[in-house]
Amino acid sequence: MLHYAVVFLVIALIAAFFGFGGIAAGAVEIAKLLFFIFVVLAAVAFLASLMRR
């Protein structure tokens, strides 16, 4: 999932470079959403691993 966030961030940077502001803004929003989902899932996995011990 982190990989997809980075991909959308690169797409946003390329789109912004070529002047496609709307596409860049959409790609940035998707990248932020995927990043925060990744962070939440990573935290849940970390806490679940602590509970097993």
Image: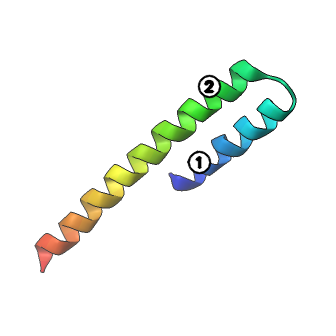
Whether residue 24 sits left or right of residue 26 in the image: it is: right
Residue at image coords 64%, 26%: 25
Dot 2 crowding, Cα within 10 Å, few <14, some 14–19, many 20+: few
Nearer-the-camera pick, 19 or 39? 19
Q: Amino acid at mark 2?
A: Gly
- Is 13 placed left or right of 42 in the picture? right
Task: Tell me residue 6's x, y (percent).
Answer: 62, 50
Question: Residue 34: x percent and y percent?
Answer: 48, 42
- Report if the CB atoms under discs 1 and 2 are less than 8 Å apart: no
On the image, numbered disc 1 is attached to which residue? 4
The spot of residue 8 in percent (x, y) is 65, 41
Residue drawn where x is 59% and y is 54% of the image: 3
Q: Residue furthest right?
A: 18
Please, what secondary structure does the residue beneath circle 1 have? helix
The residue under the point 87% across, 30% down is 18
In the foreground, 10 or 48: 10
Q: What residue is shown with label 2?
A: 26
Task: Name the N-terminal-most of marks 1 and 2.
Answer: 1
Decide: is 10 above or below 25: below
